[in-house]
Amino acid sequence: MAEHSKIQQGLNRARRRLVARYSGRAAAALIGTSLAIGLSAALLLGLSYQEAFRLGALGVWLIALTWLIVSRFLAPVSQLSNDQRTAKLLERHTPGLRTDLSSALAFGAALERGEGSAEQLGSPALMRAHMERAARTLAQHEAEAQEAVPVPSSRPFLHTGLVFLLIYAAFAMFSPQRAKDGLVWLFTGRADEVTTQTVVDAEPSKDPLVSQIIVTYVPPAYTRRGQFRAPNPTGRIDVLAGTEVVIEATPLIQTERAALVVRPLDGGEDAEATEYDMQVQPGLLAVTFTPLQDSNYTFALWDGSEKLSDPIERRITVRADQVPTIELVTPDGIIETGPTDTIPFRFVASDDFGLQDVAFVYAFGAQQDHEQRIQLLTLDGELAFEETAGFELEPLALQPGDEISVQIEATDNDTIRGPKFGRSRPVLIRIASPEDRHLANIALEEE
């Protein structure tokens, strides 16, 4: 119907104008506020070297940004999601419209369903006249309707964002590395800016450049060990593979930039070193990294444009997670039995950081390259476990004279370098024939 179509077209025009007018101002306010919150978060990230604090600041930044988008843009615009909601919004903020739009939409929907449905609400002719009048009234109040959605002033938000931009620019002038680190953390979530390269030789210093080394160890999650922090006068680091390490040290010279230089032992003097940029704070250097292999490390400090190298090389030892151990208590030696028997295996399994599962592993005769595995137990990181489990022969359909080698296998829960497997000594099971049993009985009687 023409009248209903006019109402809908008028609402669409009003909706487009409202969204366009609101979006421009709201976007400016959103940009200014996001800039202020983002730069303040980057400032905190650049000044901090504690990963937990950095993650917290990053989380606050993401939550605040999400809240801004929802509250400043999505929530107000959602009031214009359809004709009915748009009509009610315009009626609330435009007195001249009263309830004309909502009733006109209801009449139009009734007329589209048919004359019979419309007659329940009144005369179809009067409905069409009302819809025509509502369309004219909407056209007359279009300019006034543009104020239906309050538009925030963008100027205070832009001014706030500009102030924080100037503050961060000043911060970057005095500490460019930390300013860079803060922005890197804000947009990538990386803990440290790391470059792997052949390190340019630094001017060796005769005297130590750092003192009062403190190391924080964060073991891999699968070990269920908590982090711990302790002074480390020698600087020697001995860790399990996958352990995150935080090194803090006090610089003995004025420095603008510092790096931890790690050189693998297996490559000798020609091995490529990895430089980990350190956080530089008054009286404190800090870096977070995960040692990958046995290495030596030292500190490089920049005093202005001059790069100095600490004369002391310190050792990093990376220990591998140990293989699980399995002690088979019983049975022992060679067993002769029937093809339907169940052989009890009593064993004790242990691992330095926890077991994942235990299984039977068996192979027929000389076919040791074709092992098969039967899962026994799934464990939850137990350090030691003792159990008796039965190995059932009947499902294997063995024949007299067949031989089968059986072992117990334990798997640990190493998630860094992958699970490792430990096995017990093998037990040989031989299926005796009736003749073998008869001869064995005769031998027992003779004894």
Image (cartoon, helix red, strand yellow):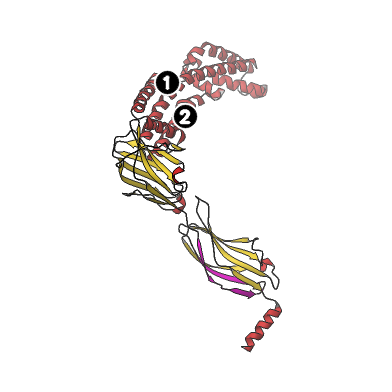
Relative to 326, say whether 230 is above or below.
above
Q: Give me the residue at 51% from left, 18% from top.
A: 20
- Residue 324 counted in the magenta span: yes
At label 1, which amino acid type do we have? Pro
Q: How many marks?
A: 2
Quadrant in which the C terminus appears? bottom right
| Magenta stretch: dominant secondary structure | strand
State yes or no: residue 168 in magenta: no
Compared to residue 63, the image places residue 80 above or below, namely above
Badge 1 element: loop
Q: Secondary structure at mark 2?
A: helix
Marked residue nearer the N-terminal end (1 or 2): 2
Which residue type carries mark 2? Val
Answer with the quarter of the image where residue 150 lies.
top left
Q: Residues within 10 Å of mark 2 (few under 14, many from 20)?
A: some
x, y percentage for residue 92?
Answer: 47, 20
On the image, numbered disc 2 is attached to which residue?
70
The 10 Å Cα crowd at callout 1, few under 14, some 14 to 19, many 20 or more, is some
Residue span colored magenta: 319-348
Foreground residue among 393 and 310 = 310
Does the image show residue 324?
Answer: yes
Which residue, given by chain and number where applicable, does mark 1 sit on? 152
x and y, in percent, of residue 264 in the image: 45, 46
**Up/down of 83 relative to 389, above or below:** above
Residue 72, percent from left and from top: 45, 26
Tell me where residue 251 appears, x and y as whole percent: 30, 39
